[in-house]
Amino acid sequence: MKEKFIEFISNLDLFTKPDILQVVIIIFSLLTFASLLFFIWGKLKPQANLAELKSRTNSWWLMVVFFVCSALLDREITFPAIGLLSFIAFRELYSILGFRDSDRRAIFWAFLAIPIQYYLAYIGWYMLFIIFIPVYMFLFIPVRLVIIGETKGIIKSMASIQWALMLTVFGISHLAYFLALPTDIPNFKNGGQGLLLFLVFVTEINDVLQFIWGKLLGKHKITPSVSPNKTWEGFIGGVISTTIIGYFLGFLTPLLDWQVILASFIIACSGFFGDIVMSAVKRDLGVKDTGTSIPGHGGILDRLDSLTYTAPIFFHLVYYWAF
Protein backbone atom coordinates (compact mmCIF):
# COMPACT_ATOMS: atom_id res chain seq x y z
CA MET A 1 0.00 0.00 0.00
CA LYS A 2 2.81 2.40 0.91
CA GLU A 3 4.61 1.69 -2.36
CA LYS A 4 1.43 2.37 -4.39
CA PHE A 5 0.86 5.66 -2.58
CA ILE A 6 4.46 6.78 -3.23
CA GLU A 7 4.09 5.81 -6.90
CA PHE A 8 0.81 7.77 -7.12
CA ILE A 9 2.37 10.88 -5.60
CA SER A 10 5.48 10.68 -7.78
CA ASN A 11 3.34 10.49 -10.93
CA LEU A 12 1.41 13.66 -10.20
CA ASP A 13 2.02 16.45 -12.72
CA LEU A 14 2.84 18.67 -9.76
CA PHE A 15 6.25 16.97 -9.58
CA THR A 16 6.85 16.28 -13.27
CA LYS A 17 6.07 19.85 -14.38
CA PRO A 18 8.00 22.41 -12.30
CA ASP A 19 6.15 25.38 -13.86
CA ILE A 20 2.87 24.06 -12.51
CA LEU A 21 4.45 23.47 -9.09
CA GLN A 22 5.70 27.06 -9.08
CA VAL A 23 2.24 28.47 -9.85
CA VAL A 24 0.55 26.25 -7.27
CA ILE A 25 2.99 27.49 -4.60
CA ILE A 26 2.33 31.12 -5.63
CA ILE A 27 -1.46 30.65 -5.53
CA PHE A 28 -1.49 29.06 -2.08
CA SER A 29 1.00 31.65 -0.79
CA LEU A 30 -1.25 34.49 -1.98
CA LEU A 31 -4.30 32.88 -0.41
CA THR A 32 -2.49 32.34 2.88
CA PHE A 33 -1.26 35.94 2.86
CA ALA A 34 -4.77 37.28 2.09
CA SER A 35 -6.37 35.18 4.84
CA LEU A 36 -3.81 36.32 7.43
CA LEU A 37 -4.07 39.94 6.27
CA PHE A 38 -7.86 40.06 6.65
CA PHE A 39 -7.67 38.25 9.99
CA ILE A 40 -5.13 40.72 11.41
CA TRP A 41 -6.95 43.68 9.84
CA GLY A 42 -10.18 42.57 11.47
CA LYS A 43 -8.50 42.28 14.86
CA LEU A 44 -6.85 45.72 14.63
CA LYS A 45 -9.96 47.45 13.20
CA PRO A 46 -13.07 45.55 14.28
CA GLN A 47 -15.25 48.24 12.68
CA ALA A 48 -13.83 47.58 9.21
CA ASN A 49 -16.29 45.97 6.81
CA LEU A 50 -14.31 42.95 5.63
CA ALA A 51 -17.16 40.45 5.32
CA GLU A 52 -17.22 40.49 1.51
CA LEU A 53 -13.44 40.21 1.19
CA LYS A 54 -13.30 37.32 3.67
CA SER A 55 -16.18 35.57 1.93
CA ARG A 56 -14.50 35.86 -1.47
CA THR A 57 -11.18 34.64 -0.06
CA ASN A 58 -12.79 31.65 1.67
CA SER A 59 -14.71 30.68 -1.46
CA TRP A 60 -11.52 31.08 -3.49
CA TRP A 61 -9.79 28.59 -1.20
CA LEU A 62 -12.45 26.04 -2.11
CA MET A 63 -12.18 26.81 -5.83
CA VAL A 64 -8.38 26.67 -5.90
CA VAL A 65 -8.18 23.38 -3.99
CA PHE A 66 -10.74 21.83 -6.32
CA PHE A 67 -9.16 22.97 -9.57
CA VAL A 68 -5.58 22.32 -8.49
CA CYS A 69 -6.59 18.77 -7.63
CA SER A 70 -8.48 18.54 -10.92
CA ALA A 71 -5.39 19.60 -12.84
CA LEU A 72 -3.13 17.12 -11.07
CA LEU A 73 -5.22 13.99 -10.55
CA ASP A 74 -5.95 11.28 -13.07
CA ARG A 75 -8.37 12.05 -15.93
CA GLU A 76 -10.73 9.31 -14.73
CA ILE A 77 -11.24 11.38 -11.57
CA THR A 78 -11.04 14.88 -13.04
CA PHE A 79 -13.71 14.59 -15.73
CA PRO A 80 -16.44 13.23 -13.40
CA ALA A 81 -15.46 15.84 -10.80
CA ILE A 82 -15.89 18.79 -13.17
CA GLY A 83 -19.01 17.11 -14.55
CA LEU A 84 -20.39 17.07 -11.02
CA LEU A 85 -19.90 20.85 -10.88
CA SER A 86 -22.01 21.17 -14.02
CA PHE A 87 -24.67 18.91 -12.53
CA ILE A 88 -24.89 20.96 -9.33
CA ALA A 89 -24.82 24.29 -11.19
CA PHE A 90 -27.57 23.15 -13.58
CA ARG A 91 -29.68 21.88 -10.68
CA GLU A 92 -29.25 25.20 -8.85
CA LEU A 93 -30.29 27.20 -11.90
CA TYR A 94 -33.16 24.84 -12.66
CA SER A 95 -34.47 25.18 -9.10
CA ILE A 96 -34.74 28.99 -9.24
CA LEU A 97 -35.98 29.51 -12.82
CA GLY A 98 -39.55 28.49 -12.01
CA PHE A 99 -40.28 25.73 -14.51
CA ARG A 100 -43.71 24.19 -15.03
CA ASP A 101 -44.47 20.76 -13.57
CA SER A 102 -44.89 19.48 -17.12
CA ASP A 103 -41.27 20.45 -17.93
CA ARG A 104 -39.80 17.74 -15.75
CA ARG A 105 -39.59 15.15 -18.53
CA ALA A 106 -37.68 17.54 -20.77
CA ILE A 107 -35.42 18.52 -17.89
CA PHE A 108 -34.63 14.84 -17.35
CA TRP A 109 -33.15 14.78 -20.86
CA ALA A 110 -31.24 17.96 -20.09
CA PHE A 111 -29.64 16.25 -17.09
CA LEU A 112 -28.86 13.25 -19.29
CA ALA A 113 -26.94 15.55 -21.63
CA ILE A 114 -24.36 16.24 -18.90
CA PRO A 115 -22.55 12.85 -18.92
CA ILE A 116 -22.78 12.75 -22.73
CA GLN A 117 -21.14 16.18 -23.05
CA TYR A 118 -18.34 15.21 -20.66
CA TYR A 119 -17.80 11.88 -22.37
CA LEU A 120 -17.33 13.73 -25.65
CA ALA A 121 -14.77 15.93 -23.91
CA TYR A 122 -13.06 12.90 -22.38
CA ILE A 123 -12.55 11.15 -25.72
CA GLY A 124 -11.59 14.43 -27.40
CA TRP A 125 -14.33 14.37 -30.07
CA TYR A 126 -14.07 18.09 -30.74
CA MET A 127 -16.54 18.45 -33.60
CA LEU A 128 -19.41 16.75 -31.77
CA PHE A 129 -18.44 18.34 -28.45
CA ILE A 130 -18.97 21.86 -29.78
CA ILE A 131 -22.34 21.14 -31.45
CA PHE A 132 -24.01 18.57 -29.19
CA ILE A 133 -25.71 21.09 -26.88
CA PRO A 134 -25.88 24.18 -29.16
CA VAL A 135 -27.40 22.17 -32.04
CA TYR A 136 -28.74 18.74 -31.10
CA MET A 137 -30.10 19.55 -27.63
CA PHE A 138 -31.33 22.91 -28.94
CA LEU A 139 -33.46 21.05 -31.47
CA PHE A 140 -34.44 18.10 -29.26
CA ILE A 141 -35.65 19.90 -26.10
CA PRO A 142 -38.46 21.84 -27.87
CA VAL A 143 -39.69 18.62 -29.53
CA ARG A 144 -39.82 16.89 -26.13
CA LEU A 145 -41.75 19.83 -24.66
CA VAL A 146 -44.22 19.80 -27.56
CA ILE A 147 -44.87 16.08 -27.15
CA ILE A 148 -45.91 16.74 -23.56
CA GLY A 149 -48.78 18.82 -24.96
CA GLU A 150 -48.75 21.80 -22.60
CA THR A 151 -48.34 24.92 -24.75
CA LYS A 152 -48.92 27.65 -22.16
CA GLY A 153 -45.49 28.99 -21.19
CA ILE A 154 -43.68 26.67 -23.59
CA ILE A 155 -41.48 29.39 -25.12
CA LYS A 156 -40.13 30.35 -21.70
CA SER A 157 -39.40 26.70 -20.91
CA MET A 158 -37.65 26.12 -24.25
CA ALA A 159 -35.44 29.17 -23.81
CA SER A 160 -34.72 28.61 -20.11
CA ILE A 161 -33.71 24.95 -20.43
CA GLN A 162 -31.42 25.63 -23.40
CA TRP A 163 -29.84 28.68 -21.80
CA ALA A 164 -29.25 26.78 -18.55
CA LEU A 165 -27.58 23.96 -20.51
CA MET A 166 -25.38 26.37 -22.43
CA LEU A 167 -24.29 28.21 -19.32
CA THR A 168 -23.77 25.42 -16.79
CA VAL A 169 -22.91 22.43 -18.99
CA PHE A 170 -21.57 23.62 -22.34
CA GLY A 171 -19.59 26.51 -20.86
CA ILE A 172 -18.14 24.69 -17.86
CA SER A 173 -17.35 21.50 -19.82
CA HIS A 174 -14.60 23.39 -21.65
CA LEU A 175 -12.64 23.29 -18.39
CA ALA A 176 -12.52 19.52 -18.71
CA TYR A 177 -11.69 19.52 -22.42
CA PHE A 178 -8.43 21.36 -21.70
CA LEU A 179 -7.18 18.05 -20.27
CA ALA A 180 -8.05 16.20 -23.49
CA LEU A 181 -6.12 18.50 -25.82
CA PRO A 182 -3.27 16.90 -27.80
CA THR A 183 0.17 17.70 -26.45
CA ASP A 184 2.22 17.19 -29.63
CA ILE A 185 2.57 20.89 -30.44
CA PRO A 186 5.50 23.28 -29.79
CA ASN A 187 5.81 25.00 -26.39
CA PHE A 188 3.06 22.90 -24.81
CA LYS A 189 5.21 21.38 -22.08
CA ASN A 190 2.61 22.05 -19.34
CA GLY A 191 -0.23 20.47 -21.28
CA GLY A 192 -3.90 21.04 -20.56
CA GLN A 193 -3.15 21.24 -16.85
CA GLY A 194 -1.24 24.45 -17.39
CA LEU A 195 -4.07 25.95 -19.45
CA LEU A 196 -6.63 24.99 -16.82
CA LEU A 197 -4.62 26.56 -14.00
CA PHE A 198 -3.95 29.67 -16.08
CA LEU A 199 -7.64 30.18 -16.86
CA VAL A 200 -8.92 29.56 -13.34
CA PHE A 201 -6.27 31.73 -11.69
CA VAL A 202 -6.63 34.64 -14.12
CA THR A 203 -10.44 34.49 -13.93
CA GLU A 204 -10.54 34.42 -10.15
CA ILE A 205 -7.81 37.04 -9.61
CA ASN A 206 -9.70 39.30 -12.01
CA ASP A 207 -12.82 38.96 -9.86
CA VAL A 208 -10.86 39.85 -6.73
CA LEU A 209 -8.92 42.75 -8.33
CA GLN A 210 -12.03 44.34 -9.83
CA PHE A 211 -13.63 44.18 -6.40
CA ILE A 212 -10.57 45.70 -4.67
CA TRP A 213 -10.08 48.48 -7.24
CA GLY A 214 -13.78 49.23 -7.01
CA LYS A 215 -13.57 49.56 -3.23
CA LEU A 216 -10.49 51.77 -3.42
CA LEU A 217 -11.38 54.09 -6.30
CA GLY A 218 -14.89 53.25 -7.42
CA LYS A 219 -17.19 56.22 -8.05
CA HIS A 220 -18.86 55.77 -11.44
CA LYS A 221 -21.26 52.83 -11.54
CA ILE A 222 -21.52 50.69 -14.68
CA THR A 223 -24.82 48.91 -14.11
CA PRO A 224 -26.44 50.48 -11.04
CA SER A 225 -29.74 48.65 -11.53
CA VAL A 226 -28.06 45.27 -11.95
CA SER A 227 -24.94 45.26 -9.77
CA PRO A 228 -24.55 48.54 -7.86
CA ASN A 229 -21.05 47.66 -6.64
CA LYS A 230 -19.60 47.42 -10.15
CA THR A 231 -17.78 50.61 -11.12
CA TRP A 232 -15.78 51.75 -14.13
CA GLU A 233 -12.74 52.32 -11.92
CA GLY A 234 -12.95 48.78 -10.57
CA PHE A 235 -13.50 47.30 -14.02
CA ILE A 236 -10.65 49.18 -15.70
CA GLY A 237 -8.25 48.67 -12.79
CA GLY A 238 -9.07 44.97 -12.66
CA VAL A 239 -8.71 44.47 -16.41
CA ILE A 240 -5.31 46.20 -16.54
CA SER A 241 -3.99 44.38 -13.46
CA THR A 242 -5.30 41.02 -14.68
CA THR A 243 -3.76 41.49 -18.12
CA ILE A 244 -0.36 42.19 -16.55
CA ILE A 245 -0.59 39.18 -14.22
CA GLY A 246 -1.75 36.98 -17.09
CA TYR A 247 1.25 38.02 -19.17
CA PHE A 248 3.66 36.83 -16.47
CA LEU A 249 1.81 33.49 -16.26
CA GLY A 250 2.03 32.95 -19.99
CA PHE A 251 4.65 30.22 -19.52
CA LEU A 252 1.76 27.91 -18.56
CA THR A 253 0.40 28.16 -22.09
CA PRO A 254 1.71 27.47 -25.61
CA LEU A 255 0.75 31.01 -26.69
CA LEU A 256 2.96 33.80 -27.99
CA ASP A 257 3.41 36.92 -25.85
CA TRP A 258 0.90 39.03 -27.76
CA GLN A 259 -1.60 36.17 -27.64
CA VAL A 260 -1.21 35.84 -23.87
CA ILE A 261 -1.78 39.58 -23.42
CA LEU A 262 -4.88 39.56 -25.61
CA ALA A 263 -6.21 36.37 -24.00
CA SER A 264 -5.74 37.80 -20.50
CA PHE A 265 -7.54 40.99 -21.51
CA ILE A 266 -10.44 39.00 -23.00
CA ILE A 267 -10.65 36.76 -19.92
CA ALA A 268 -10.86 39.83 -17.68
CA CYS A 269 -13.65 41.38 -19.76
CA SER A 270 -15.65 38.18 -20.30
CA GLY A 271 -15.38 37.27 -16.61
CA PHE A 272 -16.99 40.60 -15.79
CA PHE A 273 -19.78 39.90 -18.29
CA GLY A 274 -20.45 36.47 -16.79
CA ASP A 275 -20.67 38.03 -13.34
CA ILE A 276 -23.16 40.75 -14.26
CA VAL A 277 -25.30 38.39 -16.37
CA MET A 278 -25.84 36.12 -13.38
CA SER A 279 -26.41 39.18 -11.18
CA ALA A 280 -29.16 40.29 -13.56
CA VAL A 281 -30.76 36.84 -13.49
CA LYS A 282 -30.73 36.70 -9.69
CA ARG A 283 -32.10 40.24 -9.43
CA ASP A 284 -34.92 39.36 -11.84
CA LEU A 285 -35.78 36.26 -9.79
CA GLY A 286 -35.45 38.09 -6.47
CA VAL A 287 -32.78 35.80 -5.00
CA LYS A 288 -29.40 36.64 -3.47
CA ASP A 289 -27.69 33.35 -4.30
CA THR A 290 -28.33 30.54 -6.76
CA GLY A 291 -28.17 27.94 -4.01
CA THR A 292 -26.68 26.81 -0.72
CA SER A 293 -24.17 24.24 -1.95
CA ILE A 294 -21.33 26.12 -0.23
CA PRO A 295 -22.53 26.96 3.30
CA GLY A 296 -22.18 30.68 3.96
CA HIS A 297 -21.05 31.44 0.40
CA GLY A 298 -24.09 30.66 -1.75
CA GLY A 299 -24.19 28.11 -4.53
CA ILE A 300 -21.68 26.55 -6.90
CA LEU A 301 -22.94 28.74 -9.74
CA ASP A 302 -22.29 31.86 -7.66
CA ARG A 303 -18.62 30.90 -7.69
CA LEU A 304 -18.54 29.73 -11.32
CA ASP A 305 -20.48 32.58 -12.95
CA SER A 306 -17.35 34.18 -14.42
CA LEU A 307 -15.92 30.85 -15.57
CA THR A 308 -19.09 30.02 -17.52
CA TYR A 309 -18.07 32.84 -19.86
CA THR A 310 -14.28 32.73 -19.70
CA ALA A 311 -13.90 28.95 -20.18
CA PRO A 312 -15.44 28.60 -23.66
CA ILE A 313 -14.00 31.89 -24.91
CA PHE A 314 -10.44 31.14 -23.76
CA PHE A 315 -10.66 27.52 -24.93
CA HIS A 316 -11.57 28.47 -28.49
CA LEU A 317 -8.96 31.22 -28.59
CA VAL A 318 -6.30 28.68 -27.64
CA TYR A 319 -7.68 26.07 -30.02
CA TYR A 320 -7.66 28.55 -32.91
CA TRP A 321 -4.20 29.92 -32.16
CA ALA A 322 -2.32 26.79 -31.13
CA PHE A 323 -4.10 23.78 -32.62
Image (cartoon, rainbow, N blue to C red):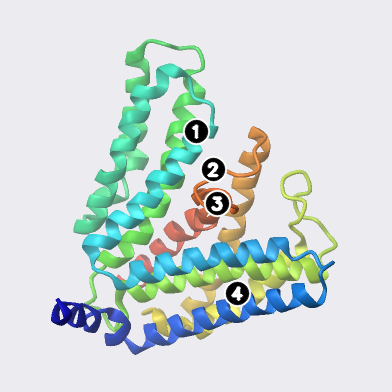
Which element type, helix, strand or loop, lies under badge 1? helix
Any mark on residue 291, and which?
A: 2
Q: Is residue 232 left or right of residue 193?
A: right
Residue 266 at least partly seen: no
Q: CA distance from mark 3 to mark 2?
A: 9 Å
Going by the numbered disc 3, the residue's amino acid type is Pro
Query: CB under 8 Å between callouts 4 and 2?
Result: no
Q: Residue 106: x percent and y percent?
A: 35, 25
Residue 256 spot, x, y in % from top left:
43, 82
Give the residue pinned by disc 3: 295
Circle 4 crowding by C-alpha within 10 Å: few under 14, some 14–19, many from 20: many
Left or right of 229 on screen, residue 167: left
Task: Say which label, 3 or 4, has the lower sequence index.
Answer: 4
Q: Are marks 1 and 3 in contact (CB under 8 Å)?
A: no
The amino acid type, in three-letter code, at marker 1 is Ser
The answer to which of 243 and 81 lies nearer the viewer is 81
Q: Earlier in the sequence, mark 4 or mark 2?
A: 4
The residue that appears at 28% across and 83% down in the rendered structure is: 186
Name the residue tied to disc 1.
Answer: 95
From this view, report whether residue 109 is shown above or below residue 318: above
Density class for disc 3 (Cα within 10 Å; few <14, some 14-19, many ≥20) is few
Residue ID for mark 4: 242
Q: CA distance from mark 4 to mark 2?
A: 28 Å
Whether tag 1 and tag 4 are in contact, CB under 8 A, the answer is no
